[in-house]
Amino acid sequence: MKFLETGIEGAHLIELEPNIDERGFFARSWSQEEFRSRGLNADLSECSLSFNRRRGTLRGMHFQVAPHEEAKVVMCIRGLIYDVIVDLRKNSGTHLKWFATELSLDKGQLLYVPEGVAHGFLTLEDDSYIQYQIAASYAPEAARGVRWNDPLLNLEWPEPPTVISDRDRDFEDYEP
C-alpha cells in the first residue's frame, strides 16, 4: 500500500499495490502494522457496507464526537463515488479545509479518514457499494453531521444530489 497525503492532517489516500497474474490480482487493503507505523489509528471495531441504488445519492457529511470519535477507511467496491472529507478539528492546522477524490475499485484507492474529520460521498453510478473499516463502534448519541452544501464549508460537488435523507438535508449550519 502507498500512503499519499491529502492536504488534511492525518488523512491519507491509499493506493493498492496489486500482485497481478492470469487469475486476476491480489492486494492488501489493510495492515495494522503499516497503519501503526504511520501513527494512524489501526483499531478495527466494525466493518460496514453501504449500498446505493441510484446515481446522485448523497450520504454525509457524518462524524462522531468524543468520546466516540471514529477513524475509518473507505473503499468503493462497486460503482463510482465522489468522496469528500472536511476537517472539523478546531486545533488542527487544516481546520475547515476539505479534500475530495473519486473512488472506485478500478482506481484501486481507499481513503483513510481520521477522528474529527467529517465524511460524505455522492454516487456517480447506479448500484454503488461502499465498504467502511471503522475504528470505533457506532454510537447514536455521538453521531453528528454537517450539511453537504453548508456555505461556510463551500464544498464543491460534481453534480447536485438527487437522493438525500431528511437527516442529511436538515443538518444545521456549521458553527466552529
Image (tube, rainbow, N blue to C red):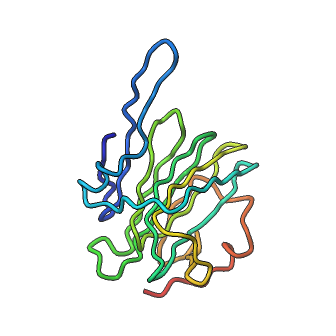
Q: Residue at x 33, y 63 (%)?
A: 8
Determine the residue positioned at 70% across, 76% down. Answer: 167
Q: On the picture, is 147 further left or further right than 21?
A: right
Eyeballing the image, is 100 above or below 149? above
Q: Position of residue 74 (x, y in %)?
A: 50, 53
Quadrant for residue 173, please give it. Answer: bottom right
**Tally of numbered discs:** 0
Vertical position of residue 170 compared to residue 124: above or below: below
Image x and y of residue 137, in percent: 54, 70
Residue in front for this viewpoint, 9 or 18: 18
> Residue at position x 57%, y 76% from top?
145
Image quadrant containing the N terminus = top left
Residue 21 falls in which quadrant of the image? top left
Q: Position of residue 80 (x, y in %)?
A: 60, 43
Q: Nearer the viewer, residue 90 or 73?
A: 73
Q: Position of residue 64 (x, y in %)?
A: 51, 76
Q: Nearer the viewer, residue 96 or 69?
A: 69
Figure check: 173 above or below 14: below
Hey, which residue is sitting farthest top in the picture? 22
Q: Is residue 174 left or right of residue 117?
A: right
